Image (cartoon, grey):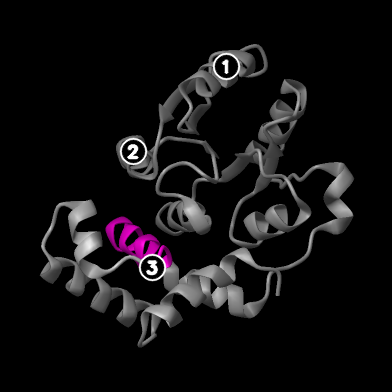
Amino acid sequence: MVKILIADDHPLFREALSGALEPFFEGAEVIESDNLESTLSMLEMHSDINLVLLDLNMPGCENYYGLIRVTEDFPEVPVVVISASDSAHTISQTIGLGAKAFISKASVVATISDAIQTVLDGGTWVPLDLKDKIDSISQEQRDSANKVALLTPKQFQVLKFLQAGQLNKQIAYELGVTEATIKAHISAIFKKLEVNTRTQAVLLVEKLQHQM
């Protein structure tokens, strides 16, 4: 029996997708998560998950971190990205960073089921009309992804605040911790990303978003 994890922060979309897939995957078990933390927890709890349908912009997943984290921690579980952001650049990034398929949220159910079945059979899938426009990501982006994969979800959350230009005391307030804790997180971030300044850390993670 196939077990699919739908990881999306919109409950109506999860419900609609689960119901729509039922006729195509009879007897399939569908479980759900609504942020990166719960997604990782579900993958920990259910070692028999056959496939993850992952939303790129779910809380905690920004800058491709969710995709990087899931593929790094659970390399044996194929990830299918399903997103409203369906440019050739976004698809190139997702495939380059480990996804086995990319599905636009605007796709009809038959297309979604075809992509899922292709991945379950060991293949990869991208929209036919964009297949010739998919580019490989650069080695620099791969290196950046490998470094970002070392960050814990909490450290990545702090990094997002750094991207927003917030001060240590502001981040501490937002997270309900002390400034000393934030300083410790930032030191760990710098070490894992092999940088020395906030600007360098922000530029490194933003490399994942840009065509190079």
Residue shown at 33% from the left, 38% from the top: 38
Q: Which amino acid lies under the numbered mark 2 shown in the image of this protein?
A: Ser
Q: Quadrant of residue 119?
A: top right
Give the distance between the C-alpha atoms of the residues marked 3 and 1, in whole angstroms.
Answer: 38 Å
Give the distance between the C-alpha atoms of the residues marked 1 and 2, in whole angstroms.
Answer: 20 Å
Q: Which residue is mark 3?
A: 165
Asked whether residue 153 is drawn in magenta, I would say yes
Q: Which residues are magenta?
A: 151-165
Q: Is residue 42 above or below residue 60?
A: above
Work out whether mark 1 precedes mark 2 in sequence or the reverse, and give the earlier one.
1
The local secondary structure at tag 3 comes to: loop
Q: Is residue 204 above or below residue 210?
A: below
Residue furthest out toward the bottom: 196
Q: Quadrant of residue 59?
A: top left
Where does the image place residue 135, in percent across and percent down from the top left? 78, 64
Front tag of 2 and 3: 3
Q: Which amino acid lies under the numbered mark 1 shown in the image of this protein?
A: Ala
Q: Which amino acid lies under the numbered mark 3 shown in the image of this protein?
A: Gly
What is the crowding at mark 2: few (fewer than 14 residues within 10 Å), some, or many (at least 20)?
Answer: few
* Foreground of the two, 183 or 38: 183
Q: Quadrant of residue 25?
A: top right
Residue shown at 51% from the left, 52% from the top: 67
Q: Which residue is mark 2?
A: 38
The local secondary structure at tag 1 comes to: helix
Tag of residue 16: 1
Where does the image place residue 163, in percent across and percent down from the top left? 42, 66
Front tag of 3 and 1: 3
Where does the image place residue 194, in percent across and percent down from the top left? 39, 85
The local secondary structure at tag 2 comes to: helix
The quarter of the rendered structure image containing the C terminus is bottom right
What is the crowding at mark 1: few (fewer than 14 residues within 10 Å), some, or many (at least 20)?
Answer: few
